[in-house]
Each structure stands twice: as structure tokens, then as C-alpha cells.
Image (tube, rainbow, N blue to C red):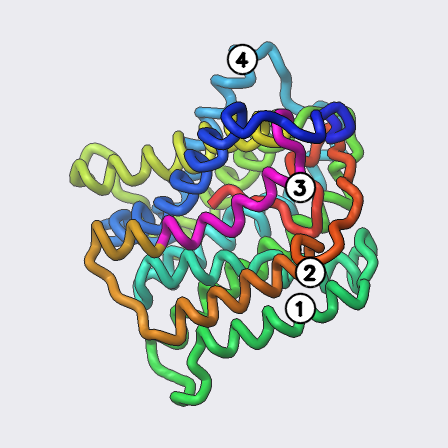
Amino acid sequence: MTADITPDKAPLRSWLPGFVALAAIWGSSFLFIKVGIEELHPLHLTLYRVATGAATLLVVLAVLRDRLPREPRVWAHMVVVAAFGVAIPFTLFGFGEQRVESMLAGIWNATTPLIVLPLAVLVFRTERLTARAAVGLGLGFLGVLVVLGVWEGVGGAHFVGQLMCFGAAACYGVAIPYQKKFIAGSAYSGLSLSAAQLLVATAQLAVVGPLAAGAPQVPADLSLPVLGSVVALGALGTGLAFVINLRNIRVAGASTASTVTYLIPVFAVLIGALVLGERLNWHQPVGALIVLLGVAVAQGLVGRRRPRPTVGAGAPAVPAVEPVAR
């Protein structure tokens, strides 16, 4: 699948409903994490979530008659991608939301593109740093400081929770360029690679979870809201959302599909306020807007646009930022 075969001007009605649905699903993930950690250790929540997502994608693979990767090299790289793209960040968001509001976790998730770019340039060498991207990174860093409210001092559980959420975004910053460099050029579909990624992450969490947090609770012992949150996080946020994202890329193009990043924190804030009654300090949404402006500048969405990139068989989204399954 390549962006080259995507029409330059796809009708809005052909992709906008799926675009908004994806933003709503990923934006609501932070609410479900908040509900889930009320009864589950963050490691156990992540284990159940990822296992449910893996099972969902395996069903989709069977329906579409696709298959898992067969090359040992791909599975070896999946160990890194699964750890930094799934197991660690999902768990860090869980730990973070024990200390901060779900809407604030959604805001921190939006910093992912600002971490992807410098790592892609300096470490993995899959991107080139332009003057526009440097300006965007500078704006994004300023936005991060505003979200943190550094003038109020640092320390305390709330600050630590924000750092955990930022650490989760930093993990995505490692996983995305790593996957682009070592896996995206393979002959396997994005669906196949994602299913493999979730299977490896499930295995990692099945080993680490009991060692670090004890045996997980039996699903039958969980309350309906928590059990529903696990299913929503796995089947919707990790399974169905990926299928929707692939369709958005096919219909609207990778560049347009990647801009879902800008809507996710909007839904996270709205859902957190309406469902959980959460409130933000004035500087947190202001800082989020500065971060998103920095992302827009770095991606060339403000000012001159760069040419639309090509999407490889294993890369659901290819710009400097890839929408990450939350």
C-alpha cells in the first residue's frame, strides 16, 4: 500500500467519519486507563489490554486471510518495537494516571512527534532536520515547559505523573523510527506486523507482570466498568482502531491520516471533563496548543507543505509522526 495511489483530493465524506471515530477512540483510551487502574495494577491492565488487542487482530488476520511474519529477523526486531511501542508506554501511562488527570495524559501523548523527529534524525537517521523542523521542535519544547508549569516549581506526585506520561511518549519516539528503519521495508502488511507486535508484547508482559506485580486478578473478579474498559482498550483502542487507521491512510493519504494526532488531546480533554469531572490549570491547555503548533510547524503543515511521503507495506503512517495506538 502506498500513498502514491491515494487520490490527491479524496472526498471529505469518504474519510472524515473514520478520522473522527479514530480520534474519539484513541482520545477515550485515557478515560478507560483511568477506570482500569482503579482495580488493576498498571502492568496487569496493560497485559489484559494488549492480549485482547492481539486476539482481535488475529481474528481480523484470519478473516482477511493474512498471515503473521515468518522471518526470524522480523520477530527479533519485534522484541524492541513491542517493548518501546507497546509494553512500556502503555504501562507508564497507567502509572502516570495514578497521579494525574486522564486529560493531562492525553495532552502528553501529543508530544510524541516532537520526540520522534530528533531521534529519527540523530539516532536512526531516517529523517533530515530542516530549519522548519528545528523551529517546530523549539516551539514544542516551550509548550512542554508551559504544560509542566515549571515556574511553579517541580516535585510532588503530580509532577512525577506528568514525567511518566512524557516518558511514555518518549518510548513511542524510539519505537516509531526504529520500526521505520528495520521493519517498514518488509513484505508483510501493516496488519500482520501489528499483530506480531502485540503478540510479542503480550509475552513480555506475561513474564514481567507477575514478577513485578504478582499474579493478575482473574477477569471474572473485576467489576463491569473495569472489565468493559479492558475490552474497550484492547478490542477498540488497539484492534478496531488500527483497521480504521489503515483505511484512513488508504483513502485520505498518510499525511492527512497522521493529523489525527491533533484531535486526540481534544477528545481526551472533553471526555475527561464530561465523564470524570476533571479540570485543567490554565497553562496546561495553553501549553498543549503550543506543542501542537510546534508539531504542525515541524511537519510542514504550517507554511510550505513538503511532498507527500510513500507508505511502505509495513508502515501504517510515514511522516515524522505516526499515529500510535494508545
Pointer 4 or 1: first along the chain? 4
| Residue type at numbered disc 1 | Leu
| Residue type at numbered disc 3 | Ser
Quarter of the image for residue 130 reads bottom right
Pointer 3 or 2: first along the chain? 3
Which element is circle 2 on?
helix
| Residue type at numbered disc 2 | Ala
Inter-mark Cα distance, 3 to 1: 19 Å
What residue range appears in magenta?
Answer: 250-268
Q: Is residue 74 magenta?
A: no
Pointer 1 or 2: first along the chain? 1
| Residue at (50% x, 48% y) in the render | 87
Residue 62 bears which disc, if any? Answer: 4
Residue position for label 1: 137
Give percent across and percent down for residue 159. 39, 76
Q: Does 71 sit left or right of 93 as displayed? A: right
Which element is circle 3 on?
helix
Magenta stretch secondary structure, dominant: helix
Give percent across and percent down for residue 268. 36, 52
Pointer 3 or 1: first along the chain? 1
Residue position for label 3: 255
Q: Choose mark 2 or mark 4, whichever is in front.
A: 2
Residue position for label 2: 298
Q: Choose mark 3 or mark 4, whichever is in front.
A: 3
Which element is circle 1 on?
helix
